[in-house]
Amino acid sequence: MYNIDPKISFWIGLTIFICGTIAAAGTSFLTGALPNWLIPPLVKWCLIISVLGNGTMTYIAGANMTNAGRLANVQQVPLPQKLDSLVENNKDTVKGVITTEAVANATSSPKVISG
């Protein structure tokens, strides 16, 4: 899939942020800084750019995602280890865990039994 250079994504995002700020602040934000005839159309265009830009940034974020992200590389904790941790950290509340024979044999807790 096509990836967009992060530098370009950054500048697009910054432009959209500035346009969103101007659009949210309204015409009073620019009064005195620009000619009065220029302010209303500029604010409207900033609103249009910020709305369309948010959709564009969502697309860019999705297009630049890969399966090699941090969460994709996290290894899962094996079930027997999870059950051991569950029993160890909740000694007073866990009376027993019933599971398959293979999982029960892989744990070190006597409370994890096969049923």
Image (cartoon, rainbow, N blue to C red):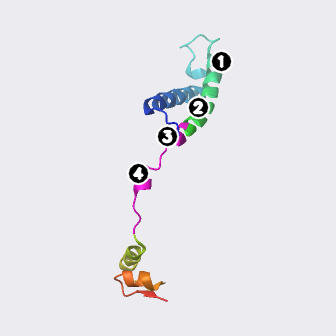
Q: Nearer the viewer, mark 4 or mark 1?
A: 4
Q: Distance between the residues labelled 3 and 2?
A: 16 Å
Badges 2 and 4: C-beta atoms under 8 Å apart?
Answer: no
Q: Furthest residue to the front?
A: 1
Q: Where is residue 52 in the image (x, y as percent from the top left)?
A: 62, 31
Q: How far apart are marks 2 and 4 (CA)?
A: 26 Å
Considering the numbered disc 3 on the image, is that residue within a helix, a strand or a loop? Answer: loop
Q: Distance between the residues labelled 1 and 2?
A: 18 Å
Return the mark for residue 64: 3
Which range is magenta? 60-77
Q: Distance between the residues labelled 3 and 4?
A: 14 Å
Badges 1 and 3: C-beta atoms under 8 Å apart?
Answer: no
Q: Residue at x 43, y 81 (%)?
A: 103
Considering the numbered disc 2 on the image, is that residue within a helix, a strand or a loop? Answer: helix
Return the mark for residue 41: 1
Return the mark for residue 70: 4
* Residue underneath mark 2: 53
Looking at marks 3 and 4 on the same chain, the residue that comes earlier in the sequence is marked by 3
Considering the numbered disc 1 on the image, is that residue within a helix, a strand or a loop? Answer: helix
Callout 2 amino acid: Gly
Looking at marks 1 and 3 on the same chain, the residue that comes earlier in the sequence is marked by 1
Q: Quadrant of residue 77?
A: bottom left
Looking at marks 4 and 1 on the same chain, the residue that comes earlier in the sequence is marked by 1
Task: Confirm whether residue 93 shows in the render.
Answer: no
Callout 4 amino acid: Arg
On screen, residue 111 above or below 60? below
On screen, residue 50 above or below 90? above
